[in-house]
Structure formats: structure tokens, C-alpha cells
Image (cartoon, helix red, strand yellow):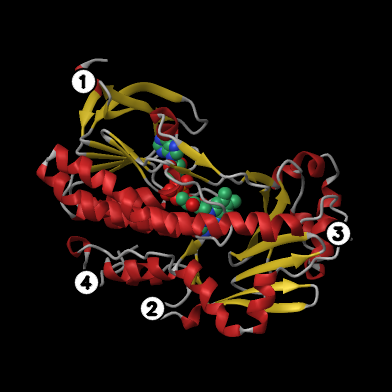
């Protein structure tokens, strides 16, 4: 490696998802030189969740970004409903939350990430490098001192490698994190009995809006309203995708229509199996989130299941906690204080992570797995899960899922250095 191919930053953030972009913004606002590396050329990923939670909306207020968010094409979700064969149950009532924006805003995540990137790029110490894939870490002895990276073409081919050295590397590269795999940090994995089929169905005027769960006939699916289409997530038993896919696409369409007769006439939009993506669900957590020179946060530290739609919120809250404790030591160039701060992030964020993952694990094993028909016939009667029955009976309990989904177990607030007065929407 020649000297010309090595550059330097104070904090290298790998991955421009919700965790990486929030951390980059916070550190830049603290005056820390920060470089975010994102392997894709834009944020237009189809598989990103669409939810911006109540506590993230409060955070955007604190960061002065609410006017910009409010200009995005979001849909306000104040109630989550589950549609059963026997009727609808209101499952979560977010209006019961004591917060400035008591809702979950449904917005394609690329809008949120674009907005965060624009705000961060207003800070002189922030750099975002798109189309830049990190291929591994650089070490001096046991210590991570930087990353190896390469430009990535549209088709995924990589250019020549170079190095970026940094006082701290933060892995925000998601649940398949290359950095965490390479780090050898010990990992606890939960057994997950389900996967998700991910596809789109056109949405018409007058159709249900917001987020809707559909439970019945041995199946469970979630519909996310993206305006003129629904992003649909059909929960299937792990390992059953191949069997499903060995049938014709018409069998799959019939299967969805049988569950949702009101979708009749529009399921031809699922033209073939290429329109149905399998998303494998994983649930795991690092036992240690940091090593010398390296910190993992968000899904890179703890891959979240889609259950409850809370992974984005947890990733953002990790980033806020990390930004708060790391900004001072990074700015001061105090290596010992950076290491102490990095390891304190895990202490702070373990409690909400464990609470959320334990509930997701219980939901997988006790609620969803028993509900799923093993043979796709749809003939199996669906027993309404106990939590849904209880919430139907005692509506005041709707506060509980609202709090867990909207706010989480330990919401984080913007540190003083990152707060701004409401910022105008940039022209154009
Ligand atoms: C099917 C499914 C649906 C979900 N739906 C929801 C939902 O509706 N709401 C919700 O809150 N959560 C949802 N989740 C969970 C949520 O997606 C994650 O918890 C959340 O995205 C984690 O954010 P992150 O920033 O840690 O990682 P990610 O969002 O995964 O971002 C990681 C980023 O790193 C980049 N990257 C990866 N490797 C490299 C590399 N080597 N070099 C450079 N860049 C790299 C990626 O391109 C990506 O931009 C869902 C999960 C699944 C599986």
C-alpha cells in the first residue's frame, strides 16, 4: 500500500443506514471530523423499513429537523390494527403517548436518509462517500486503526483498494456486518422460526391506510402503506420458501387473495417469483460491542427481527448514545477516553436491546410460529393470540405496544451540542 492511497479521518463510520447517518450528523455537529462510507450509490433500497418512530420524531425536533421531515411525503400512523377473520382489533394506540408527535410516520426510508445526509453535509467536518465499500479493517497489533475500502461500480465490482485510517471505526453496516464478522467479537444467536416474503400490491383510493396486520387462516402478513402501493411482508416458517416457490406464482397470488379478498383483480402486479423477495430474519446480539479501535452499533451489534418494526428506532438510539459520549474524547484526540466511551455505549444500550429482543423472541416462538399453517392450505383455524385477546378486551393496554413500538425501553435525546432551532427546508 503506498502512502498516496492512505487518507485519514477522526471517526470512520461504516454504513449509511439509520445508525450511521445519525451518528455522522451528531459527531459533525460536535465539530469532529467524521467520514461515513456507504457501499450503495443512493439510499433507494427496497428492503429498508419505513417506520420513523415517536421518539425519533422527538429527536428530529431537538435536532431542528422537524420542518424538513414534515415536508416529506409521510403518512401518520396513530393506530395499529390487526384484521382477524372475526373482525378488526385495535392493537396499539399511539395517541396515548405523551410526546410532541404521538405517531409512527410511515415514509420510505430513503427520504429520511437523504434528509439526514443533507443536514450532515451542512457541517464542514462531515464527509459522506457513497459507492464506497469497506472490504476489511486495518490493524496495528490488536488495535483497529482504519479500514480498507474500494469504489464500487453499479454492478457491484470493486476498484482498487485504498486505506482510511481513523482514531475510531464504528461499524454501522447492518445485520450482515463484515466488520463484526472480522472482529471475532462473540455473538449470541436466537433460534428464529420464521422468514419474510416481501412484495408489492397496488393500493387504491379508500383502501386501509397506515399499517395493517392481517392474521388468519394460518397466516400472518403486514401491509405498509406507501401511498399508491402496499409494501407487503408475509411471514412464513423458516425453510418453507423453497416449497412455496416450487409452486406457480398463481398459487401464491391465490394464497394472498384468499387472505385479503379485497385485493382481487390487482395481484397480477406480482408478475413472477422475481417480484417476491425472501428476507431471512435473524435475531442476535454481540456479547461485546467494542474492541480496541472498533465499536459496533445498530444491527451490526444486534440484528433485529421485523416484529414490532422497531429495529430502526433502536439503531438510531444507539447512535445518539454513541454520539453523546464519543464527541468530546474524539474532538480532544484522547485515545484512552475514546476507548472508555466506546465501551460505555454497550452498558447504556444493553437494557433496551435485551428487553426488545426478548419480546421479539417470545413473539416468534409463542405467537407467530404456532399460528403459521405448515401446509399453506389456509384451512387451519387461527387461534387469536392471548396478547391480542387481552388488548381487545382491555383497550387501555393499547398503551403498552404503543410505548414499545413508538418510544422503546430507553429513549435517547439529542445532546446539547447537536440541538438546533427549527431549520428551514432547503430550496429545490
Ligand atoms: C424484512 C425486514 C423488515 C423490517 N422492517 C422494519 C420496519 O418496518 N421498521 C423498523 O424499525 N425496522 C425494521 N426492520 C429492522 C431494520 O431494518 C433494522 O433494524 C435497521 O435497518 C438497522 O439499522 P442500521 O443502520 O443498524 O443498519 P442498516 O439499515 O442495515 O444499514 C446498514 C448500511 O450499511 C451499508 N453497508 C453494509 N455493508 C457495507 C460495507 N461493507 N461498506 C459500506 N457500507 C456497507 C448498507 O448498504 C446499509 O446502508 C426490518 C428488518 C427486516 C429483516
User: Image quadrant of residue 151?
Assistant: top left
Tell me the SS state at disc 2: loop
Which circle's residue, 1 or 2, is located before the other in the chain?
1
Q: Is residue 326 above or below residue 103?
A: above
Which circle's residue, 3 or 2, is located before the other in the chain?
2
Rounded to the nearest angstrom, the CA distance separating label 4 from label 3 is: 54 Å
Which is closer to the viewer, label 2 or label 4? 2
Is the CB of mark 1 within 8 Å of ligand 1? Answer: no
Q: Which residue is mark 3?
A: 378
Give the quarter of the figure containing the N terminus.
top left
Q: Which residue is mark 4?
A: 421
Rounded to the nearest angstrom, the CA distance separating label 4 from label 1 is: 41 Å
Which circle's residue, 3 or 1, is located before the other in the chain?
1
Counting the numbered discs, the total is 4
Q: Is residue 367 left or right of residue 49?
A: right
Tell me the SS state at disc 3: loop
Q: Residue at x 22, y 40 (%)?
A: 339
Q: Viewer-proximal residue, 313 or 341?
A: 341
Q: Residues within 10 Å of mark 1 (few under 14, many from 20)?
A: few
Q: Viewer-proximal residue, 176 or 246?
A: 176
Which circle's residue, 4 or 3, is located before the other in the chain?
3
User: Image quadrant of residue 40?
Assistant: top left
Which is closer to the viewer, label 1 or label 2? 2
Q: Which residue is mark 2?
A: 99
Amino acid at each position: 500500500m503506498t502512502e498516496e492511497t492512505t487518507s485519514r479521518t477522526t471517526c470512520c463510520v461504516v454504513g449509511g443506514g439509520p445508525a450511521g447517518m445519525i451518528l455522522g450528523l451528531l459527531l459533525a455537529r460536535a465539530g469532529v471530523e467524521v467520514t461515513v462510507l456507504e457501499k450503495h450509490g443512493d439510499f433507494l433500497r427496497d428492503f429498508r423499513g419505513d417506520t420513523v418512530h415517536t421518539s425519533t420524531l422527538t429527536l428530529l425536533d431537538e435536532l431542528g429537523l422537524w420542518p424538513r421531515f414534515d415536508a416529506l411525503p409521510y403518512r401518520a400512523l396513530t393506530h395499529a390494527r390487526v384484521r382477524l377473520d372475526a373482525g378488526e382489533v385495535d392493537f396499539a394506540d399511539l395517541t396515548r403517548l405523551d410526546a410532541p408527535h404521538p405517531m409512527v410516520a410511515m415514509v420510505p426510508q430513503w427520504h429520511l436518509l437523504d434528509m439526514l445526509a443533507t443536514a450532515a453535509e451542512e457541517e464542514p467536518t462531515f464527509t459522506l462517500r457513497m459507492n464506497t465499500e469497506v472490504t476489511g479493517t486495518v490493524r496495528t497489533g490488536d488495535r483497529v486503526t482504519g479500514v480498507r475500502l474500494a469504489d464500487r461500480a453499479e454492478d457491484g465490482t470493486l476498484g482498487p483498494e485504498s486505506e482510511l485510517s481513523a482514531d475510531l471505526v464504528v461499524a454501522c453496516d447492518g445485520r450482515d456486518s463484515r466488520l463484526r464478522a472480522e472482529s471475532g467479537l462473540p455473538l449470541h444467536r436466537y433460534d428464529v422460526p420464521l422468514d419474510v416474503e416481501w412484495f408489492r400490491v397496488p393500493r387504491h383510493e379508500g383502501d386501509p391506510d397506515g399499517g395493517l396486520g392481517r392474521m388468519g387462516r394460518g397466516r400472518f402478513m403486514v401491509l405498509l402503506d406507501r401511498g399508491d402501493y402496499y409494501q407487503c411482508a408475509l411471514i412464513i416458517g423458516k425453510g418453507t420458501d423453497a416449497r412455496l416457490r416450487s409452486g406457480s406464482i398463481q398459487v401464491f397470488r391465490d394464497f394472498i387473495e384468499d387472505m385479503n379478498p379485497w385485493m382481487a383483480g390487482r395481484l397480477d402486479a406480482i408478475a413472477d417469483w422475481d417480484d417476491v423477495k425472501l428476507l431471512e430474519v435473524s435475531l442476535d446480539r454481540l456479547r461485546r460491542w467494542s474492541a480496541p479501535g472498533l465499536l459496533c452499533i445498530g444491527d451490526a451489534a444486534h440484528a433485529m427481527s421485523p416484529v414490532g418494526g422497531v429495529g430502526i428506532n433502536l439503531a438510531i438510539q444507539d447512535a445518539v448514545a454513541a454520539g453523546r459520549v464519543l464527541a468530546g474524547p474524539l474532538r480532544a484526540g484522547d485515545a484512552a477516553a475514546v476507548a472508555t466511551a466506546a465501551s460505555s455505549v454497550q452498558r447504556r444500550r444493553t437494557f433496551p436491546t435485551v428487553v426488545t429482543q426478548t419480546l421479539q423472541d417470545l413473539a416468534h416462538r409463542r405467537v407467530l410460529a404456532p399460528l403459521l399453517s405448515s401446509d399453506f392450505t389456509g384451512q387451519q383455524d387461527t387461534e387469536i393470540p392471548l396478547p391480542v385477546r387481552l388488548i381487545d378486551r382491555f383497550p387501555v393496554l393499547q398503551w403498552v405496544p404503543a410505548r414499545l413500538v413508538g418510544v422503546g425501553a430507553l429513549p435517547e435525546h439529542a445532546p446539547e451540542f447537536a440541538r438546533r432551532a427549527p431549520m428551514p427546508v432547503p430550496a429545490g
